[in-house]
Image (cartoon, rainbow, N blue to C red):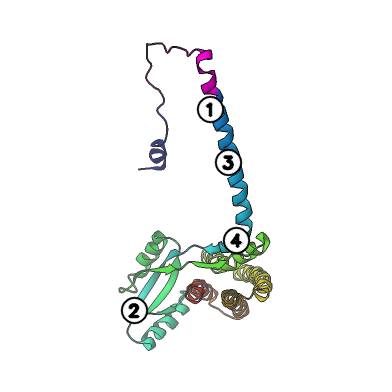
Amino acid sequence: MNEIDLYSAYQLPSTVGHHNNKIKKPKKGKHKWFILLIIIIFVAIVFFVANAFANFLSFSSTSVFGNNKVAVKGFNIYAVSLNTFEDKESATTLASEVKLKGGAGYVVNGVNFSVLASIYASSSDAQNVLEKVLPTYPNAGIEVIKINRCELQALSSDDENEQVQNALNIFKTTYQSLYDIGISLDTSQITSAQAKVKITDLLNSASAIASAFGDIATATSNAKYKLTQAKVDQVVDLLNDLTESALISTRLSSLIKYNQISCLMLQNELALLIG
């Protein structure tokens, strides 16, 4: 069922049945007390609702607001895994080869060791890449990786909560920015020099977010804020290392893909820490 069909289920019919019989009008004198009673009841209901709403606002501004959360949703990413090994040494060897070819070469340590070429927000993008690498890597496949939800207790200031939201979003937004830079670089829409400028701009933006959140985390006694600050700072460190490596590396595309994955894995690490 498409969206139009779904919402049409809630629409009223366009026509209604008509009756030939005329409805007799009630006599005003007979029902004047009944109408007056209805008006009194209506006024009482309006007064009650208005009073209850005012009390609710007063209550929410004190106790309810403090129980609110600032959160980012979980989501799935689709990774192209080139091969899986039981030992880390074999995975590391393949990862090094993949990096030389422009892939991420990111090793995921689970039950076994998977070597990822890159990650994608959509399964169709991952499928397109899989079809390209299968002739070279017959054991390749798509792995669905869950990036978990993160949340922190809301603060009393909307401005502070906006900074908290930015901090929790830094993992995904950095990934998305690096993804866009990587795609533009791989398709020759930008040069390596231009990509390096964009990475530096991204570092500056992330540093500003981390600094603003750091002030908030320092001022609060909430331990989860301190843990979050550590992970946000790791994003900045990651981008700083990428910026420095980009100046001398001949495999910038590979570095960008590797750091895309690293950013999102930091969100999962944070989710485990703060629950």
Query: Can you identify the residue that label 1 sits on?
Result: 38
Residue 198 lies in the magenta-colored region: no
Label 2 sits on a secondary structure element that is strand
> Could you tell me how far apart the alpha carbons at marks 1 and 2 are, in whole angstroms?
75 Å
Q: Does the CB distance between marks 2 and 4 fall below 8 Å? A: no
Label 3 vs label 2, nearer the camera = 3
Q: How many badges with numbers are in the image?
A: 4
Query: Can you identify the residue that label 4 sits on?
Result: 63
The residue stretch that appears in magenta: 15-35
Kind of residue at badge 2: Thr
Give the camera-side residue of 75 and 214.
214
Visible residue check, residue 141: yes
> Could you tell me how far apart the alpha carbons at marks 3 and 2 are, in whole angstroms?
66 Å
Among the 4 quarters of the image, the one containing residue 159: bottom right
Q: Does the CB distance between marks 3 and 1 fall below 8 Å? A: no
Residue drawn at x 33%, y 72% as measured from the top left = 140
